Image: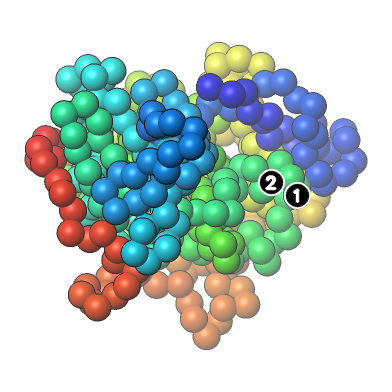
Amino acid sequence: MSSRTPLPTVNERDAENHTSVDDGRSEVLSRSIRSARCKTASSSGADESPHVGNYRLLKTIGKGNFAKVKLARHILTGREVAIKIIDKAQLNPTSLQKLFREVRIMKFLNHPNIVKLFEVIETEKTLYLVMEYASGGEVFDYLVAHGRMKEKEARAKFRQIVSAVQYCHQKHIVHRDLKAENLLLDADMNIKIADFGFSNEFTVGGKLDTFCGSPPYAAPELFQGKKYDGPEVDVWSLGVILYTLVSGSLPFDGQNLKELRERVLRGKYRIPFYMSNDCENLLKRFLVLNPGKRGTLEQIMKDRWINSGFEEEELTPFGEPELDIRDQKRIGSKSREQNLHHS
């Protein structure tokens, strides 16, 4: 895995006295190999044009230990897609079960700001996930290249993120790995949430107990090893993401995991001088140590900062449209799926 330049903390940013992200920092933020850009390679001769189903494979755009992501083009429509190629032989039964759960969840979701899974192709040794291609790359890389977003830009992106995550929650799906690296941008700079490798279904009254995700974005109850309902850990992560978009830095950081844990459990973070009062007040609804007192996304959709400039279109829960069989975007919708019923 390649190392990543981290986002500095606000303390570091103030010392630098500018808004661009310093590329010289050495600490690495963790990154999941399950990203929708992290794909597995396919072997072929250099002069050949390899195919998978109705797709012509192009360049490799991501690599993990057991998977590669290839840019590919649908032969009939010419549409570019991302194909995650997974070597099943390298996965143990538990990892395979999680993979099939990820596939099942992605097939279930249909939201404009969530990466779409178009088709699943399975052979004896390999699983191919044909997904929507987000050509704008990661929000993480955007922040590294451009620095923090103005609040107007951050608001437009964050509304899309909140809409998508609230949609997941109303479908009883919790993502559990929300972070800047898993937020992709399409060609029009719209958000596409990716990497559902840690996602799971939750039930009202039921509890989850797995520590998932990247530590800088993890809720305090996860560090404490407590069981949790589900949505509240995503809500905390959204608070970290909002802070990151507006400041270009992380609210909680440390030289090691122990130091990071201590800072998260204290729940204290620095408010940059340029952050508006409305944005600060919204952050206080996300980054609450007591998970029972965090705002729900339905409540947050009515927040003043969220809807500033959008008074005529207040953010509301997404209404899933009925499927249109004539929709050309549903390429390859007739999947060749086998054995995908693992839970």
Q: Residue at x 37, y 57 (%)?
A: 74
**Residue 129 percent location from the top left of the image:** 30, 43
Taking depth in this image into account, of 177 and 331 the one nearest to the observer is 331
Q: Which residue is mark 2?
A: 143
The answer to which image quadrant residue 155 occupies is: bottom right
SS label for mark 2: helix
Q: Residue furthest bottom?
A: 312
Q: Disc 1 marks which amino acid?
A: His
Q: Which residue is mark 1?
A: 146
SS label for mark 1: helix
- The reply to whether discs 1 and 2 touch (Cβ–Cβ < 8 Å) is yes
Q: Is residue 142 above or below residue 306?
A: above
Colour style of the rendered protein structure: rainbow
The answer to which image quadrant residue 341 occupies is: top left
Q: Is residue 314 above or below residue 317?
A: below
Q: Residue furthest right?
A: 17
**Residue 278 percent location from the top left of the image:** 65, 62
Q: Disc 2 marks which amino acid?
A: Leu
In the picture, the quarter occupied by the C terminus is top left
Taking depth in this image into account, of 336 and 270 the one nearest to the observer is 336
The answer to which image quadrant residue 178 occupies is: top left
The crowding category of the residue bearing disc 2, from other C-alpha atoms within 10 Å (few below 14, some 14 to 19, many at least 20), is: many
Q: Residue at x 23, y 46 (%)?
A: 120
